[in-house]
Image: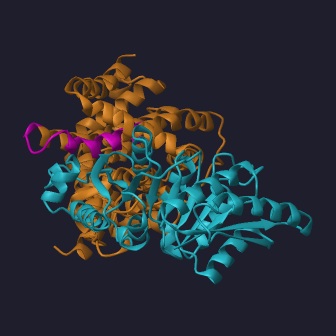
Chain colours: A orange, B cyan
Amino acid sequence: MRPILLFPLSIYLFILAIELMKQGAVALVPAARMYIAPNDVITSLGAGWLSAYVMMSGSPVAASALMFFDADLIDELSTFTTITGSRLGASFIVLLIGFVYLLRKRGGVENLKMGLISLVVTGSTHLLALAPGLFALKYSLLPKFAINSDSTILAATEYAIAPLVQVCASVLPEWSLFVLGLLVIVCSFSIFDCCIPKVSLKESRLGQVSRLVYRPAVMFLLGAALTMLSMSVSVSLSILVPLSERGFVRQENVIPYIMGANITTFVDTLLAAILLGNATAMMIVLMEIISVALVSAIILLLCYRTYEKSVVGIVGWIISEPKNLALSIATIIVVPFLLLAL
Amino acid sequence: MRILIASVGHPHSDSALGFGLVLARRLNAAPTIITVIKDEHARSSVSAFHEQILTDVKPWCANATCVIRQGNPAEQIVKYSLSSQVDLIVVGAKTAGSPLQWGIGSTATWVVAHAPCPVAIAKGEITDLRRLLLCVSAADNPDLSGIALNKMTARAATSLEITVLHVMSQIAAAPGTAARWQLDADANTLILEHTPEGMRIQKDVSALLISGAKVDPKVRHGLVVDEIMAESREESYDLIVIGANQNRGWKRFLLDNLEHRIAARSETPILIL
């Protein structure tokens, strides 16, 4: 099917998924209260992280966090940390793909470098952004926005989506609408990925990401721009492949690219918050964006070279010996469980 | 070959003078020492300084000249080089009292950006010129060895030892990328396998061999500037040779200014082609 037809379908499914999850979350809250500590930021960080592993994606988990917040199961701070955890978990996916290739003996540890760089950059920026983000949320430093519930967009979604949601609610248990919504949101992202045009700038200046060293700010903006369109860090990283000759990119270029990608990857979560009609949820997502952007800007402007060397050094240490790699992957898997247990 | 050496009598420019004279002697070139004064009061002392220099170099070079100009140092140096068709400019790393102790100085920066010819930035104390580190990339830069460097090596009194260094900081953009072996390969393997980097290195090596220099190709893996700095620290090079960022307009905005970063961090003199 042509991308031009798939795009509105993916958007429709995304909105449908939000409505299904919203309705399903309300029914899940009583049961969830027995198992979830609603105001524990550490546990919710681990929950978001682990859930992203299970879903193989961060966006559905972030959307789920907003639904639970809207249903009063978790508070603002826990929602913030759940979304942060979902980004940490999502950054593992790129590494996992490389690891699968390694296990299938298709190449050596070089397959892991892109995933490791993505993980280290995402982990460092998001963990550094936790403190300022939580502080700003706790003391309400951002002005609260009012979402006009009579807006044309919300009215249109109500008209186009509500009947289908009602049909689902009439035939399925209400709690299962949440699960159905999760499946639909995953489908919407898959369809959206098919809509992304093939980027081929090999002959242009930007196409020489393996031969030229770009200014960090330029790659930062490119990563932010391409991820705003793709709404996924892993997809925008895969766009680097057609941009480069022989499938190589320079480390100097990919690090700021990932930093930029980590900011605009929240676009779909922000859209979910807007569709939810919850101004506080929107503020939480904006705080994620602002805190990560602030940390990234500080790194880029004040200490980028040190940061760059540190990232390369950490990744180099991890792949230097199998025991380092094993220890690192074990840590990445175990930490969210530990956070849940705390 | 004509070399323009910028000297203002300060410690940093003494390094430019010393290095410039070493270069001139090594390359059998006629040096012109230029001093840019701010006001007329300094002219007599500078003239005396120049007389002493001419006396010192006379045994090995009877064609040395000295000129005095007044105004902005960087502008006057470039202006003179344009009018006199200089082949190489030698400047010191910093002007005295520069607030930016970690940079290469505003004069050197401006001269590098506007000079019509290669610029050598003098650092430390150099007594001879034997080992060069030529840093090449696989990008579409002008043929470094084909232009000024080859001219220099051909004029060197005795054979130079040149290491042609390419730094690969690439990683696979996606797992399962074909030809991944190139990311770990050494220079000889890249040359034998005719990879883009190997062909570029081979081209430079071949051109330099014609001039009679001893050439050694080398590949390092890591961040470009860090690996160049590591190589220059580990081996005792007398000069690092790099290409200038010759892009203009928006293209210049896109690319990182590697030659400035290398020049700022290096403790070895830099020749920017």
Image position of A72 with respect to A205: above or below: above
Number of labels in the image equals 0
| Foreground of the two, A132 or A321 | A321
Looking at the picture, how far across and down is residue A208, in whole percent?
Answer: 33, 66
Residue name at image x 68 percent, y 46 percent: B101
| Identity of the residue furthest to the bottom in this view | B83
Can the viewer see residue B222 in this picture?
Answer: yes
Left or right: residue A70 versus residue B160 is right
Residue name at image x 38 percent, y 40 percent: A312
Residue name at image x 21 percent, y 48 percent: B186
| Identity of the residue furthest to the top in this view | A342
Magenta span: chief secondary structure:
helix
Q: Quadrant of the N terminus of chain A?
A: bottom left
Q: Quadrant of residue B64?
A: bottom right
Q: Quadrant of the C terminus of chain A?
A: top left
Which span is picked out in magenta?
A: A103-123
| Foreground of the two, B259 or B121 | B121
| Foreground of the two, A43 or B121 | B121
Looking at the picture, how far across and down is residue A193, in whole percent?
Answer: 25, 61
Confirm whether the magenta stretch covers residue A219: no
Left or right: residue A48 versus residue A145 is left
Confirm whether the magenta stretch covers residue A117: yes
Looking at the picture, how far across and down is residue A105, in whole percent?
Answer: 7, 40
Can the viewer see residue A281 in this picture?
Answer: no
Image position of A196 with respect to A55: above or below: below
Looking at the picture, how far across and down is residue B66, in whole percent?
Answer: 71, 69
| Identity of the residue furthest to the left in this view | A104
Left or right: residue B152 versus residue B69 is left
